[in-house]
Amino acid sequence: GGGSSSGGGTSGVSAGSSAGGGGSAGATSAGSSSSTADAHPPLRQSVSDAEGKIRTQRNESAHIFAEDGTPLHTADGGKDYVAFSDSDIAKFKGKNATLTHNHPGGWDYPKGDPRHDGNSFSKEDGLMAAQADLKEIRAVTPTKTYSLGRPQSGWNEAKLNKAYADANASTRVQFTQQIREGRMTNAQAQAQHQHTVWQSVSKTIGAPYGVE
């Protein structure tokens, strides 16, 4: 993400190529997440174990699990992306899978800097969830865990794309104004941008979204 003072680093998962996206983390939740709280204990344990391993990594890694916690696929990427081929996606598409991955960008900033909290989802993360019909996509940062669940009506890439574009634009205008008025710093805007975007997107597409 870029363009104005609000925006952030890039981070995301992508089908076929490296992903880019915005970066942020906020401290509040937009609704409750379906997340692994409703999952089978083996899935909760599998996800928890994976997230414990990847949270402190400086490159992105993704782990995908079936509903019973069985690993379906693992992928390692670069500093701000994990890429999947069509054959990779075929391993877990339509299997009600949960994908978790890390957003390491927050490690570039010291504790006390709002950007240390890391990024919420990029647009590419959401599109990946739609393309693979994931039950849930998760992202862990130095201090937070984000969750986005499948909308009640199912994933719709066109609707997601429009909702994201609208929310991204309006958030940029809102934050730029707050920076000009001295009510927000550039660092705060970068730290909160993506989380604010996904609060809006999740409501528009009817998807559970949360952060803890």
Image (cartoon, grey):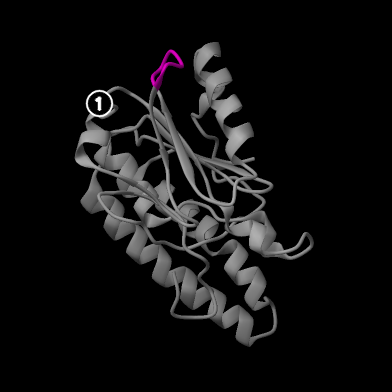
Specify the quadrant that holds the C terminus: top right
Q: How many marks?
A: 1
Identify the main secondary structure in magenta.
Answer: loop
| Residue 69 is inside the magenta segment | yes
Seen in the image, is 87 located left or right of residue 73? left
Residue drawn 59% across the image and 52% down it: 58
Q: Where does the magenta region start and end?
A: 66-71
SS at circle 1:
loop
Q: Is residue 23 above or below residue 134?
A: below
Q: Nearer the viewer, residue 83 or 200?
A: 83
User: Which residue sits furthest right?
Assistant: 112
Residue 209 x %, y %? 49, 41
Q: Is residue 191 above or below residue 135?
A: below
| Residue 177 is inside the magenta segment | no
Seen in the image, is 76 located left or right of residue 130? right
Residue 124 x %, y %? 35, 53
The residue singled out by tag 1 in the image is: 94
Q: Is residue 70 above or below residue 17?
A: above
Residue 121 x %, y %? 47, 51
Residue 206 x %, y %? 37, 41
Q: Counting other residues with Cα less than 10 Å from the Cα at mark 1, is it few (<14), some (14-19), or many (20 or more)?
A: few
Residue 204 visible (yes or no): no
Residue drawn 33% across the image and 64% down it: 165
Residue drawn 59% across the image and 62% down it: 192
Specify the quadrant that holds the N terminus: bottom left
Residue 93 visible (yes or no): yes
Hey, what amino acid is under mark 1?
Gly
Q: Nearer the viewer, residue 81 or 9?
A: 81
Q: Quadrant of residue 110?
A: bottom right
